[in-house]
Amino acid sequence: MLKIAAPTRTVQAALLMICASASISVLWAVLRYGAETMHPLYMVFWRSLLGAAVLLPLFARRGFASLRTRRLPMHFVRSASGLLAMTGIFYSIAHVPLAQAMAINYSAPLFATVGAALILGETLHRRRLTAVAVGFLGMLVVVRPGVQHVDLGILAAVAGAVGMASALLSVKKLSSSESTPTIIFYGNMLCLPIAFALALQHWQPMTWHNLGILAAVGVISTVSQAFLTRALTLADAGAVLPMDFMRLVFVTLLGVALFGERPHPVTWLGAAIILCSTVYIARREARLKAAARRAPAAPEPAA
């Protein structure tokens, strides 16, 4: 009897990454559909509020003693970065073709690499710096300043990528002393008043239709994060990041089928350049870390 070998961890991670890409693309399509009846800032507030409503009962059962922290300012930076990312992404989805917004979103790891050098003091060697420069060249190909009008939607997409990078760096700094649940809790809670203030100028009565859209956003966000987290648990980022290009494929198909969009062919070229750059950086970083683990420990000095 023929036995079929179980897929390796890398293959499982790649399949999970494709599932994450598909669910993220569906999420963006739902957000674009929601933007037809709700302002993006209004959706950002309700998305944050519903997330907080889910978290509060969980922490009430566990007890709030675990939330004690001496790093509240850094938690606020993390929360503000997340709010910037969400606002930029939601706004760009509503005003920019989905494929172009997604292509710009690929640049978040590039901003994170630069931020790690400027803020965390990480060294940017020549190859890594070249990869970052090539990645930003790809973003210029997508944005095409001087060829097309760089409007607020495109600037919002860039701001969303910067916010994602800043949130990533903030989590990296906080993780040295704070637990993951604590980071998640403060990340969701601290900027709720700011999100509410931004949403007030676009306030409208909540309908069951809009509530259903927001509930779908919450569910799909959770599912996509679960797929992504599991994929990165099974394999290094460098091994699964090439599958992230499927996000652009899926979101382009949804944009064409549901909203009649026709993405410019140059968008694909720029996105490919950006993704190749981020994959190279991730793989090189993984190789350097592996080499550092294999390196023999330095001998202790003689007494």
Image (cartoon, rainbow, N blue to C red):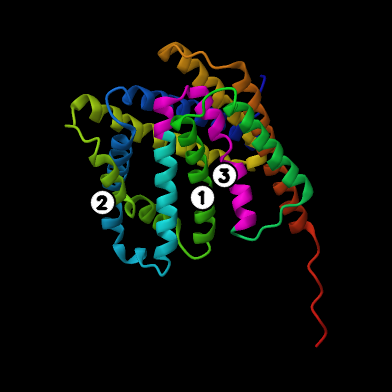
Q: What residue type is labelled 3?
A: Thr
User: Could you tell me if the residues under marks 3 and 2 are in contact, i.e. CB atoms within 8 Å?
Assistant: no
Quadrant of res 109: top right
Residue 200 visible in the picture = yes
Residue 166 numbered mark, or none: 1
**Residue 143 percent location from the top left of the image:** 57, 28
Q: In which quarter of the image is the N terminus?
A: top right
How many numbered tags mark residues here? 3
**Residue 117 percent location from the top left of the image:** 65, 55
Residue positioned 34% across, 22% down in the render:
33
- At label 1, counting other C-alpha atoms closer than 10 Å, the crowd grade (few under 14, some 14-19, many 20 or more) is many
Q: Which amino acid does label 1 sit on?
A: Ser
Residue positioned 40% across, 55% down in the render:
181
Q: Does 7 sit above or below residue 54?
A: above
Residue 251 numbered mark, or none: none
Q: Quadrant of the C terminus?
A: bottom right
Q: Does 27 sit above or below residue 45?
A: above
* Residue farthest front in this picture: 146
Q: Which amino acid does label 2 sit on?
A: Pro
Residue positioned 43% across, 66% down in the render:
71
What distance separates the C-alpha of mark 3 from that of mark 2? 27 Å
The stretch in magenta equals 90-118
Residue 97 magenta: yes
Residue 233 numbered mark, or none: 3
Q: Which of 288 and 48 is in front in this view?
A: 48
**Residue 228 percent location from the top left of the image:** 51, 38
**Secondary structure under badge 2?**
helix
